[in-house]
Amino acid sequence: MKNKKVYIETYGCQMNLADSEVVSSLLHDDGYEFTRSLRDADVALVNTCSIRDHAEQRVISRLGEFKRYKSNNPEMVIGVLGCMAERLRSKLLDQLRLVDIVVGPDEYRKLPGLLGAAFDGEKGIAVKLSKVENYDDIIPLRTDGVSAWVSVMRGCDKFCTFCVVPYTRGRERSRTLHSVVREIEQLFDRGFREVTLLGQNVNSYRDGEHDFSDLLMSVAHIDPKLRVRFTTSHPQDMSDKLIRAIADYDNICSYVHLPVQSGSDYILELMNRTYTIDHYMKLVGKITSTIPGVALSTDIIAGFPTETEEDHQATLEIIKEVRFDGAFMFKYSPRENTKAWNMGDDVPDEVKTRRLNEIINLQRSISLEINKQTIGKSFEVLVERTSKKSDSYFMGRTDTNKTVIFPEGDYNVGDYLNVKIYDANSATLFGHVVTRQGWVDVRIAVEA
Ligand code: SAH
Ligand code: SF4
Ligand code: F3S
């Protein structure tokens, strides 16, 4: 569509960020241009998340704000994409009259057609899930940068009883190793220095010939200057081979996100997480003894149906035992049509809030202790951008995924630096640059 401008806003997980880049690529090929301002937009798209009620409410109130722009520009086409589109379907068109099109995660190829029809006043909906769609042939449209998110599989077959993802994203399917590697080679040539391989459960990655550790190692081989990260590993099926690969490759980052969800075996069973705390602790033991200096993070849900005070104490215990570097912590939010929906929602909101706060405070104090131990040590840091708070500071991350702030200097985004830490809080390390790494020189020497 010539001269039409698209505005896209993205909510939810990194998978959605990656999908917005696929959507941008499809629309770019159809002749659309992009704008960062809603005021200039002919098309406004929101890529949405359904994981918790709060995530959906945010989008609904944001769409309320879109009304103002649409009344100034009645021709504007408004589209809802992503997980809410899949979950709520035609309800979105019925209930939010300003919405023109609703497109689920497996139907983005239909967007150009649906938008074309919408300019002629026709509302449209496409929400079929697919067993095969993985957008393997589409090169996501990314702005240049240092870090890229690369989707390596879609969907989820785990059916944790609290979770909407298997319903909004459909069945598991993987891209081929060769297509992922080709995409990342091109990213490296464009200057990207870090990739995060994405899947709801990367341990079930299979392309017929290769498993996830094969993929991870192939990506790590692209260049020693490329940092490789991944998310998420399900604790049930993280293989020894994968742990070995993280330990053996310098450029596969020593950081594992391993959601535990609860410290109580009883609750884990109700959640259909398919592992016990004993299994989880053995896995953590294997990871920490095989990968020196590894950082671990987790996800935790407070107030799952029937959770007792004792279950909650067990969650605090596991946090103390593992000593996670960080955690994403949530109040349980019932989702319609999931199995847990039928278990009721019997933990009162004030109890959920109190338990969540106890979890957050404990985790914060552990993160602080762990981060304080970095003071006086030096780490290799990849420079990502100027600091949000001040132009005279840069921000980068350690291999273990810790954010580091350090003064600006004679170096660029994408450089590797050695940074010595002089202070830390529970979320951030502060340091001085010690030396630049010899990487660049070594490579020039090799190529010459
Ligand atoms: N596939 C990933 C997680 C995807 S969702 C995994 O299995 O780890 C991210 C996190 O959101 C989950 O780990 C869980 O902690 C949280 N979450 C999912 N559904 C939720 C719900 N109904 N209420 C509260 N938190 C939820
Ligand atoms: Fe949801 Fe469980 Fe799948 Fe993660 S593994 S996306 S929590 S169903
Ligand atoms: Fe949300 Fe869908 Fe991701 S529900 S967390 S955007 S897969």
Image (spheres, rainbow, N blue to C red):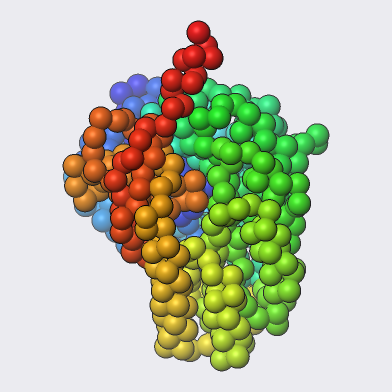
Give the x, y percent position of residue 27.
44, 29
Give the x, y percent position of residue 81.
47, 47
Give the x, y percent position of residue 276.
73, 73
Is there any visible trace of residue 297 in the rendered image? Answer: yes
Is 347 or 424 nearer to us in this picture? Answer: 424
The quarter holding residue 266 reads bottom right
User: In screen coordinates, is 314 left or right of 364?
Assistant: right
User: In screen coordinates, is 112 left or right of 262?
Assistant: left
The quarter holding residue 198 reads top right
Is 369 or 129 nearer to us in this picture? Answer: 369
User: In screen coordinates, is 326 left or right of 163?
Assistant: left
Marks counted in the figure total 0
User: In screen coordinates, is 254 left or right of 212?
Assistant: left
| Residue closest to the far front | 376
Residue at coordinates 56% horizontally, 54% vertically from top-left? 293
Residue at coordinates 34% horizontally, 27% vertically from top-left? 33
Is 369 or 150 nearer to us in this picture? Answer: 369
Residue at coordinates 24% horizontally, 34% vertically from top-left? 409
The relative height of residue 138 versus residue 162 in the rendered view (above or below) is: above
Residue at coordinates 59% horizontally, 64% vertically from top-left? 259
Is there any visible trace of residue 137 in the rendered image? Answer: no
| Residue closest to the far bottom | 309
Give the x, y percent position of residue 208.
80, 36
The relative height of residue 410 versus residue 170 in the rendered view (above or below) is: above
| Quarter of the figure with the N terminus | top left
| Residue closest to the far top | 448
